[in-house]
Structure formats: C-alpha cells, structure tokens
Amino acid sequence: AQSVTQLDSHVSVSEGTPVLLRCNYSSSYSPSLFWYVQHPNKGLQLLLKYTSAATLVKGINGFEAEFKKSETSFHLTKPSAHMSDAAEYFCVVSDQKGFQKLVFGTGTRLLVSP
Amino acid sequence: DTAVSQTPKYLVTQMGNDKSIKCEQNLGHDTMYWYKQDSKKFLKIMFSYNNKELIINETVPNRFSPKSPDKAHLNLHINSLELGDSAVYFCASSQDREAWSSYNEQFFGPGTRLTVL
C-alpha cells in the first residue's frame, strides 16, 4: 500500500525567497508522484508529476520537484516565492499497478509575506 | 471552457435528507472519481468509474451511491444525510484508468461544499 508524509503542516516564507515543501512517500511498486495546489475555496490544480522518466520534474509557475528513490522523497521547490503562491499544497502518490488510486498527503499551507 | 464542472457549488441541508451532487467533464476522459475532503483538508478517494462501470469503491457507507449515466457524467447520491457527511466533495477525471499509464493525471472540479445541519 502507498502512503505520503508531508513533513510540515505550515511553511512561511517572504516574497522573493526560496520555497521548500517536503514530502516522503512509501510505495509497494514503482510510484507515480504528483504535487497539487489548492487555492482558498478553489479546486485542485496539478503543478507537476513524476512517472519514472526524468527525476527532476519541472512544473507550472516555476515549481520543480526531484524524485530521490534512495531517500523516498519528492520535495517541491521554487527559487523565488510570489504572493500568489500562498495556498495549500498536496503531495500525492499512486502505485503504478492496477487502477489509478491517488493517495494524498495531509497538505502543507504555504504562507507568503511581503 | 470548464473541463470538470460540479453542481451545486454549495449545498446546505438537514440531517436525514437525501441529496445529489452532479459532475460533468468535457475532456473526453474515460475515468471519473469522487473524493471527499474533510474539515482538516484531508482528501480521500471514494469511488472510481470507467466507462460507466464501477472500478473502485473505498468502503464508503452504502448511503452513498454513485451513478454514471454516460462516461461524461458521474453523479453522487447520498441518502439519510448525517452530520459527519459535511465536507467538500470533489469530482475528477483522467484519460486512462490504469495507474501505469502516461495519461494518469487527474483533473479536478471546483468542489461542492456540503453542510449538514
């Protein structure tokens, strides 16, 4: 069975500084990994995904994530935070076996101050 | 052009009532899903349908009954609503049902906030 641990429930940064949101996963098979973002009272938007191709994945809005199998990690980074990045971020795993079933982490609230 | 739409956006109702939430996708996808997001923002899959056929049922109470009249629609009917059903319900769709597919990303609707009083 697969699972995800998001290590921080809240992360606070200043505008213009780097962002790091941490995620560790557990998977019985080769995993697909995703980061989704949820702005207040909105639906979920896919930021990026990893499906066993390049380990460094680039997404929308300047975000990227690196798949590290030895560390079972898939941390999300951005070089410079923007006020509009303030939102809830979910790390998601899916075993690459059987029917698709996304398993979500508990989320990290990113706060960006001016 | 809305890809995955849900109606209604908000639903407030009394305990014991029966209600439905509708979902439609215009992406031409074969697979649709229902997720529940609780008050702590935790998201969990409830059901998955592929071409009108139920393929995932995550031990949801049988008061919840999904129905897929065609592959573009997946509705959720809830009988005898309870306080604990209050949540945001998200519909999603993906092109393929297989987890190993390159087309395995899921597109989410805007959510329906259900409040049971």
Image (spheres, coloured by chain):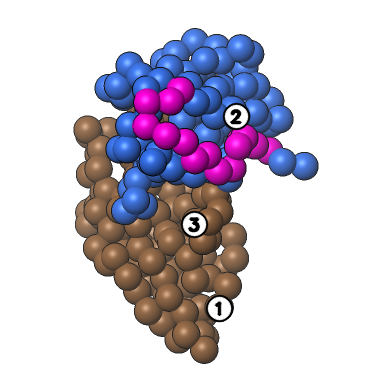
Chain colours: A brown, B blue
Q: Mark 1 lies on which chain?
A: A
- Whether callout 3 and callout 2 share a subunit is answered no
Label annotation for residue A83: 1
Give above or below for A18 relative to B67: below
**What amino acid type should be assigned to the residue bearing mark 1?**
Met
Instruction: Judge whether residue A44 is colored magenta.
Output: no
* Residue visible at 35% across and 19% down in the picture: B63
Judge left or right: residue B105 versus residue B27: left
Q: Name the residue under label 2.
A: B23
* Residue visible at 59% across and 28% down in the picture: B22
- Element type at marker 2? strand
**Label pair 1/2, CB-CB below 8 angstroms:** no
**What amino acid type should be assigned to the residue bearing mark 2?**
Cys
Report the mark closest to the observer, 1 or 2.
2
Q: Mark 3 lies on which chain?
A: A
Instruction: Judge whether residue B15 is colored magenta.
Output: yes
Where does the image place residue B11, in percent across and percent down from the top left? 52, 39
Q: Mark 3 points at which residue?
A: A37
Measured Cα–Cα span from mark 3 to mark 2: 21 Å
Measured Cα–Cα span from mark 1 to mark 3: 14 Å
Label 3: how many residues lie within 10 Å, few (<14), some (14-19) or many (20+)?
A: many
- Element type at marker 3? strand
Range covered by the magenta-colored residues: B3-18
- View extreme (bottom): residue: A114
Splitting the image into 4 quarters, where does residue A62 fall?
bottom right
**What amino acid type should be assigned to the residue bearing mark 3?**
Val
- Element type at marker 1? helix
